[in-house]
Amino acid sequence: MRTAPGSLTRAGKGDVIVMIRVFFYCGVAVLAGELLLLAFNLRRVFAGGVGTGLKRNAAWALGAGVVCAAASLFVYYPYADGIRIYGFPFAAAALRYENGGWADYVGPMTDLYSFLNATVFFLLPQAVLFGVFRYKGREKGVKSTVDF
């Protein structure tokens, strides 16, 4: 099968499709894990099992999540000379350098994937907060509200 020159799926360059699929499936797994950690953290904060210092850490985690989500809008990685993939872990668009500018190749899922990328990055600090809750809880002898 022959494709257009410079196409992302041209002969010998099909590895990017596999890479994007692997990133997609890993992104789904990470997003599911982060949502579970968020549920644990919210349950822990609202159950009253943490002190004011850890509640302050929870507020900082939400603030850091907003910064990470905003930063996710600028994440891209190079694929080949003149080709960039926008969005990680969900590939939202492909950019190609043509005629002195970056031409974009977007699809109907670009907005959804950009939103999912921002959600993944927003929830990243929740994983750190989960570790802080677990460590501080063990240090003080507090029984966890969720046992893993």
Image (cartoon, rainbow, N blue to C red):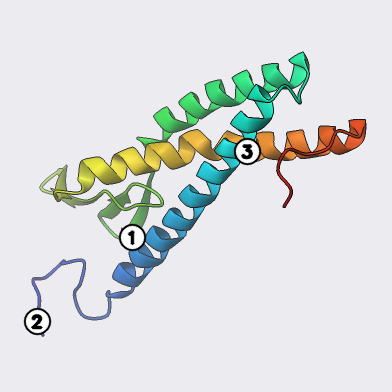
| Mark with earlier residue (2, 3) | 2
Q: Specify which label sits upstream in the sequence, 3 or 1.
A: 3
Residue at image point 35% right, 66% down = 21
**Does residue 31 appear left or right of residue 114 in this picture?**
right
Residue, disc 2: 2
Q: In which quarter of the image is the N terminus?
A: bottom left
- Measured as percent of width and height from the top left, residue 94 is found at 23, 52
**Residue 138 badge:** none
Residue 71 locus on image (x, y percent): 43, 32
User: In what element is the residue under mark 2?
Assistant: loop
In front: 7, or 106?
A: 106
- Vertical side of 10 occupied by 61: above or below: above
Q: What residue type is labelled 3?
A: Phe
Nearest to the eye among marks 2 and 3: give it. 3
Instruction: From the image, state whether disc 3 or disc 1 is nearer to you.
Output: 3
Identify the mark nearer the N-term, 2 or 1: 2
Q: Which amino acid does label 1 sit on?
A: Tyr
Quadrant location of residue 135? top right
Marks 2 and 1, how far apart in space? 20 Å
Q: What element carries label 3?
A: helix
Q: Which residue is drawn at 60% across and 30% down?
A: 42
Q: Note whether 29 is above or below 75 in the view shown.
A: below
Q: Which mark is residue 79?
A: 1
Q: Label 3 belongs to which residue?
A: 40
* Amino acid at the residue labelled 2: Arg
Residue 58 location, quadrant? top right
Q: In which quarter of the image is residue 5?
A: bottom left
In this rendering, position of residue 125 left or right of residue 109: right
